[in-house]
Structures are given as C-alpha cells and as structure tokens.
Image (spheres, coloured by chain):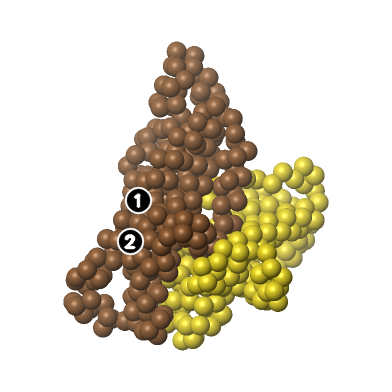
Chain colours: A brown, B yellow
Amino acid sequence: MWEYLTDPFNWSGNEGIWARIVQHLWYTFAALGLSVVIALPIGLRIGHTRRGAFLAINLGNAARALPSLGLLMIAVLLTDQIGFLPVLIALVALGIPPILASTYAGLSGVDPATIDAARGMGMTGREILTKVEIPIGLPLIISGVRSATLQIVSTATIAALVSLGGLGRYVVDGLKLRDFPQMFTGALLVALLALLLDAVFALIGRITVSPGLKIG
Amino acid sequence: MSWIGDNLGLIWEQLREHLYLAILPVILGLIISVPLGYVATRYAWLANPLIAFGGILYSLPSIALFIVIPAVLGTKVLSTVNIIVALTIYTVSLLIRNVIDGLRSVPPDVRQSAIAVGYGALHRVVAVDLPIAVPVIFTGLRVVTVANISMVSVGAVIGIGGLGELFTLGFQKDFLTPVVVGVVLSLALALIADVILVTLQRILTPWARVATPVAEVA
C-alpha cells in the first residue's frame, strides 16, 4: 500500500489521487449544498411554527434505515442514466433527513420562556427566528449538517459503481483487478477525508456558536 | 412481479444473510460495550477518551472499514468476518457512550442503598445498575441496530451484502424490481427490529409504565 501511496506517478494527472480527491469533494459539496438549501428552510419553518414536527422526527428516524446503495441504484434506474444526476439525487436524499431533523430539534429545544421574553421585548417573528432561535439551535443544526456530510462523503464512494470518479474508483477498480493495495489506498483516503471534514465541522461549530451558550 | 415469484429462494437466502450480518454485530457489540462501559465508570478518566475514540471510529465510512479490516486481521477480503467485525466496531463505538451515560444515570443514593442492603459489586451491577441504565442503553441499541441493517448492504460493493446483492444484481441487469425488493425488505427488517427492541425494553423495565420511546437525533 505504501508503494502505491508513495509513487508520485499515482498522485498526478487526470486519474491521479489529487484529481480523485477533488472529484470526491465536488460530489460531496454539491450534494451537501443542495441538501442544506432544501432541508434548512423546511426545518426552520417546522421548528419555528412547531407544525409538522411529526414529519421531521420520523423522517430523521426512517432515513437511518434507508440503504444508501439501494437508493443509488433506484436513482440510476429511474433516471435511466448513468452519471452525475442519479448520484446527486441519491446523495441529496441521504443528506436531507439529518439536516431537517436536527434543525427542527435545535429550534424546538429552545426554552419557551426565552421566546416569550423575546416577544415581550417587542421582537417580531422573524427577529425571534434569526436572533434567538437560530443562534440557540445552531449547535444542533451544525451537528445535523455534520452527520449529513459524513453520510454523503462515505456514500460518494459508491458513486464509482455507477461509473463516476471520486475515491471510490480505487475501491471498485481495485476489486475488479484484485489489486488490493489500490483498494486499501481508496479506503484509507476516504476515511481520512471523512475525519478531516468532521474536524472542520467541529471547528466551525466551535467558532460560530454564541459565547453565551458555552457558559456552564 | 414474476421475478419475485421466480426468485423467492434467492430473496429468502439474502434476507437471512442480511439479518445474520446485521444482528450478530449488535449482540457482540453489546457484550463488549457493557463491561467496557462499566470499567469506564469505575475509572472515570477513561470515559471521555473512550467516548471520543468511539466518535472517531463511528465517523469512518463503512466501505473503508470493510476493506481495511482484512489488511489488519489477515482475513480474506471476501470474508463475511470483515463485515461482522466492522459492524461490531460501529456498534461498540456508538453504544459505549450510551452504556456510560446509562450507568452514570444511576442515582448515588440508589447505589448506596443497594450496598447497604448487602449487594456485592457484581450483583449490584447486574441487579440494580444495569436495569436502571436500560432505557439509555436501548436508545443507543435502537439507533445502531437500524444503522447496521442499512449498512450491511454496502458490503455488496465488495460482494457480501445480504439484500445489498439484490441492488447490484438489479443494476447489472438494468432491472428495477430486485432493487425495490431489497430496499423494501431492508426497511421492513429495520422496522421489525426496532419494534422488537421497543417491546424488549418494555419487558425489561416493567416499572416504567408510561414508556414513551424517545425520538433521538444522531
């Protein structure tokens, strides 16, 4: 495995390790961005109005049971094409539930007395959402985005099964060629990427969370 | 639809393999995490590092573990042992936090009462501490069981995946039915397993009359 990793030839070029990492990150962030754009407003709305909580909670639980590989295959067969679109659909479908559920959980965990106090101070609904509920719910919202990211980054590996690039190529090609060092390389890089992204989100959480919430 | 009828044997076999690959790690993981969690509550300095390490392990992609484990253990890449070990690692890394939290949730006066009426250490843990920790442990057990059932199918990428093999089969033949059958059965397994765990928890904690299952966000 070290031979594979330390050979500069394997790192450069269109099919080199760097290119694969960039592809992998591109799938991940495209899907993550789209998931956030879809799930965050819905989660905020449910959390703010407290209507539709049933949906938010159960969607989050049910999504954990959803086999990602099956989802991807269904997306491929239903869109009747191989490539970026079905992969994006499958990854977004995996990304939405954790973000939606934790955004709702973050907002619904805000003490009603705090919201009453904000209303008593004359804040409008929008101000309560942006100045009270979102800052207080932020740690949970970020942890939802974090688990969505982990889901997506691991599942993006499977994208190689449907002829896309990314780090999964090493796994799939390596398996086909019985080239195990290549498989290990792919697996190791995906794991490192996941740990790195996880650390980034931990850092974002630490930076963005209001200092008032950290006391105690 | 006729595909289902023609392939009942195959579907049944994959379903059984799926169940075995998902549930055995839960049992093994529980057997490992309970004593480990107990040790971590006795030696409190161990608890936080253990939980943090578990968090790191849990964030590793399953496909990566399925492949790296044979390199570490020396098993064959296509051996079911890899899946079982990988999922056991996930189970322990998630469950350890719940076991520690659960054991910590035992009120000190309850523990002292148990000591006062003459319970020995082991007897106390089994008869007092663990029953009180059951709800917290079961919260983790439910999460990890459902997650394991969905994760087994990823093994199909490396050729061992229970129902996941129906996914690759459908993909190779450009045929939706096996994939849908696999997804539906996988969801059904998760649902049934969850119901069984909730029921088991109620049986184990008869004193919790109003047992409302807690919705958890991972």
In the image, residue A20 lies at what x, y percent?
Answer: 28, 66
In the image, residue B212 lies at what x, y percent?
Answer: 72, 43
Return the residue at label 1: A30
- Cα distance in 3D space between marks 1 and 2: 10 Å
Q: Residues within 10 Å of mark 1 (few under 14, many from 20)?
A: few
Element marked by disc 2: helix
Identified by mark 2, the residue type is: His
Residue A38 in the image: above or below residue B140: above
Q: Earlier in the sequence, mark 1 or mark 2?
A: 2
On screen, residue A71 versus residue A87, left or right, reads right
Element marked by disc 1: helix
The image's mark for residue A24 is 2
Discs 1 and 2 lie in a common subunit:
yes
Placement of the N terminus of chain B among the 4 image quadrants: bottom right
Q: Chain of mark 2?
A: A
Identified by mark 1, the residue type is: Ala
Q: Depth check: B181 or B131 in front?
A: B181
The residue shown at (49%, 53%) is A94
Q: Depth check: A37 or A129 in front?
A: A37
